[in-house]
Image (tube, rainbow, N blue to C red):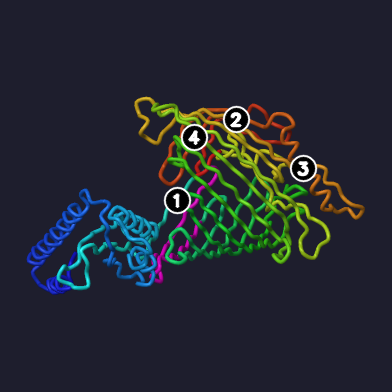
C-alpha cells in the first residue's frame, strides 16, 4: 500500500512533461507497492502457520481507498472487529473469520470493486503501546464508479420495449443508491420510476427504500388500459440462513380506461378510478443452486397484502395472499433434472372504512392465470372466468407443473441450454355462492362461506392442463423458452394456445 510520501511523489510525477519518464516512474512505484503487498502476504502466511489457536488482538482496522464513503458508515462495519469492543478474546482462526465476514459485508453493499484485498500485519514493535499479540488489519476497497447508465431493448411474451436506466451509487457516502428508470413498450406503453435505497445501521441485510412510479399498461385480454400512479416504501431484511422478508406500504391511484368497443359489462362496471392503500409482506427462502435453471434445491415464498382495512383508507378493501414452492431434483451427475412446483392464492373481500358490508373484488386486484411463464399451453390470462371476449380474473386459484430437463447432445451439461418436457395445469375461480342480504349486499358470514366453497371447488374435476416440449436457455438476466404445447383439458370460455409459444422471464411454474 502506498504511503502518503509515495502519493505525493506520484502526484508530482504526473506533472512532468515526459510521458515515457512518467510511465517508468509509475511502473517503479507499482513494483514497490506489489513488493510491499507480497511481503505482507508472506507475513500473514508465517503468522497463520500452525498457530490457529494463538490468541491475538485486533488493535486497528483501516479501510484504504474508500475516499467517497463516510467514515461513520465504515465504522459501523469495522468497529465490531476491534478487540476493544469485544468481551471475549480472539484466537487467530476466529479473527481471520471475522475479518472475512466484514469483507463480505462490504462487498454486499455493491459500491466497491471486487475483490476487496485484505492485508494483516503486526504493528511497529518499538511502539510501547503495542503487545506481542496485536495485529493490524488493512482492507483495500476501491470504490466503483458513482453512476451507471444503461439503455437497451427487451422482448418477451407478446411484448417488446425500449428502456433507459440510470443509477447513482454511494450518493451520500453511506451506500445509498438513486435509481431512475423509464421504458416505452408495446404492452406496457410507458413506465417511469424513481427509487431511493439506503442500508440501515451500516447493515447490507437491512435496507429501506422509497419509490415513486407511474405506468400505463395495455391489457388486451380484458379490453382496457390500466394507468397507475403512486408510491411505496418498504424495509427488507435478510437472515443469515437465507430467509428474506419485506414489509411495505403502498398508496396507488389506479384507473381502468381506454375501453375497447366490445368491452364486456364486467369491465365496463369496473371502469374509472380507484385508490388502493395497503400493507404488504413477502417472504422468500431460496435454496436453489441456480434460480433460473436449478439442478438442485428448493424455494418457498409467500406474498400477503392487506388493503383498505381500518385506518388504511382507500376505496378497495381485501386480504390477498399467495404461496409458492418449487423443488429441483437431479438424476445423479447426468445433467438431467426434475423440477416441480405448486402455487396458489386467494382474495378475501373485507369491509372498507365508511361502509357496512364487504365489497366484491375489482379487475385490478383479481388473479389472472395462463401464459408462457406459468400455465403453458394457454393464452395470457386464458384460464378462469371470462365475460365474452374478456378474461375477468378470479378470486381463488391453484396451479402446478413438472418439467424434466435434459442436456442437449454434443452441447454438454455444463451449458445453460436444455431440452424439456413438461406438464402443467391449474384452476382459477370467482367466488361461488355470492349470497346477498335483503339489501342486495354481501355480509361477512356470506363472504366467509363463499370463500370456503370456492376453495373446495378447486378439486372438482380435472384442472385445465397442457403438456409439451421445448428448449430452455438460462441467460444471466432471464430465462428463455420456446415450447410446443398441446392442451389436454380446457373448460368453456377458456383460451388455449396449441403449437409454438415463446416465453421470457425470471420466474416459471
Q: Which of marks 1 and 4 is nearer the N terminus?
A: 1
Report the residue marked by disc 4.
328
Q: Does the magenta stretch include residue 435?
A: no
In the displayed structure, does residue 401 sit left or right of residue 26? right
Q: Position of residue 133 (x, y in %)?
A: 23, 62
Q: What element carries label 2?
A: loop
Q: Does the magenta stretch include residue 164?
A: yes
Report the residue marked by disc 1.
153
In the displayed structure, does residue 88 sit left or right of residue 226? left
Report the residue marked by disc 3.
452
Q: In which quarter of the image is the C terminus?
A: top right
Residue at (39, 28) in percent of width and height:
333
In the displayed structure, does residue 73 sit left or right of residue 394? left
Magenta segment boundaries in residue numbering: 157-183
**Which residue in the rendered view is the most extreme toward the right?**
438
Q: Would residue 329 be seen by someone viewing this image from the given angle?
A: yes
User: How many marks do you count on the picture?
Assistant: 4
Q: Distance between the residues labelled 3 and 1?
A: 45 Å
Report the residue marked by disc 2.
498
Q: Earlier in the sequence, mark 3 or mark 4?
A: 4
Amino acid at each position: 500500500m502506498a504511503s502518503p510520501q509515495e502519493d505525493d511523489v506520484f502526484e508530482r510525477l504526473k506533472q512532468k512533461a515526459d510521458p515515457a519518464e512518467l510511465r517508468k516512474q509509475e511502473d517503479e512505484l507499482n513494483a514497490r507497492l506489489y513488493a510491499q503487498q507480497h511481503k505482507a502476504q508472506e507475513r500473514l502466511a508465517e503468522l497463520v502457520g500452525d498457530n490457529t489457536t494463538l490468541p491475538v488482538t485486533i488493535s486497528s482496522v483501516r479501510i484504504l481507498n474508500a475516499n467517497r464513503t463516510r467514515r461513520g458508515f465504515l465504522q459501523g462495519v469495522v468497529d465490531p472487529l476491534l478487540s476493544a469492543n469485544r468481551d471475549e478474546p480472539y484466537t487467530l482462526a476466529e479473527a481471520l473469520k471475522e475479518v472475512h465476514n466484514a469483507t463480505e459485508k462490504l462487498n454486499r453493499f455493491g459500491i466497491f470493486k471486487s475483490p476487496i484485498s485484505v492485508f494483516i500485519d503486526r504493528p511497529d514493535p518499538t511502539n510501547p503501546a503495542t503487545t506481542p499479540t496485536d495485529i493490524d488489519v488493512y482492507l483495500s476497497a476501491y470504490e466503483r464508479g458513482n453512476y451507471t447508465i444503461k439503455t437497451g431493448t427487451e422482448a418477451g411474451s407478446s411484448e417488446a420495449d425500449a428502456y433507459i436506466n440510470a443509477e447513482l451509487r454511494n450518493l451520500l457516502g453511506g451506500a445509498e443508491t438513486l435509481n431512475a428508470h423509464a421504458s416505452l413498450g408495446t404492452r406496457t406503453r410507458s413506465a417511469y420510476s424513481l427509487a431511493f435505497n439506503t442500508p440501515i445501521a451500516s447493515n447490507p441485510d437491512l435496507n429501506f427504500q422509497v419509490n415513486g412510479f407511474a405506468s400505463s399498461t395495455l391489457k388486451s385480454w380484458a379490453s382496457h388500459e390500466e394507468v397507475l400512479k403512486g408510491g411505496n416504501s418498504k424495509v427488507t431484511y435478510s437472515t443469515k440462513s437465507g430467509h428474506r422478508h419485506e414489509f411495505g406500504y403502498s398508496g396507488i391511484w389506479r384507473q381502468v380506461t381506454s375501453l375497447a368497443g366490445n368491452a364486456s359489462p364486467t369491465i365496463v362496471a369496473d371502469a374509472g378510478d380507484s385508490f388502493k392503500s395497503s400493507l404488504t409482506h413477502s417472504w422468500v427462502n431460496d435454496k436453489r443452486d441456480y434460480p433460473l435453471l436449478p439442478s438442485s434445491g428448493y424455494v418457498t415464498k409467500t406474498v400477503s397484502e392487506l388493503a383498505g382495512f381500518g385506518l388504511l383508507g382507500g376505496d378497495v378493501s381485501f386480504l390477498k395472499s399467495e404461496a409458492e414452492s418449487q423443488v429441483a431434483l437431479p438424476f445423479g451427475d447426468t445433467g438431467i433434472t426434475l423440477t416441480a412446483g405448486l402455487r396458489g392464492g386467494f382474495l378475501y373481500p373485507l369491509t372498507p372504512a365508511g361502509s357496512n358490508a364487504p365489497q366484491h373484488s375489482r379487475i385490478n386486484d383479481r388473479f389472472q392465470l395462463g401464459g408462457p411463464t406459468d400455465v403453458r399451453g394457454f393464452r395470457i390470462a386464458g384460464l378462469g372466468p371470462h365475460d365474452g371476449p374478456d378474461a375477468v380474473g378470479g378470486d381463488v386459484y391453484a396451479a402446478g407443473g413438472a418439467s424434466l430437463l435434459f442436456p442437449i447432445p454434443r452441447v454438454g451439461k455444463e451449458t445453460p441450454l436444455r431440452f424439456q418436457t413438461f406438464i402443467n395445469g391449474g384452476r382459477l375461480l370467482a367466488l361461488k355462492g355470492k349470497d346477498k342480504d335483503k339489501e342486495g349486499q354481501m355480509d361477512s358470514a356470506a363472504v366467509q362461506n363463499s370463500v370456503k366453497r370456492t376453495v373446495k371447488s378447486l378439486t372438482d374435476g380435472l384442472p385445465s392442463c397442457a403438456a409439451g416440449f421445448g428448449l430452455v436457455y438460462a441467460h444471466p438476466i432471464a430465462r428463455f423458452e420456446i415450447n410446443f404445447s398441446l392442451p389436454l383439458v380446457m373448460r368453456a370460455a377458456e383460451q388455449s394456445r396449441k403449437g409454438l409459444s415463446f416465453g421470457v422471464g425470471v420466474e416459471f411454474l
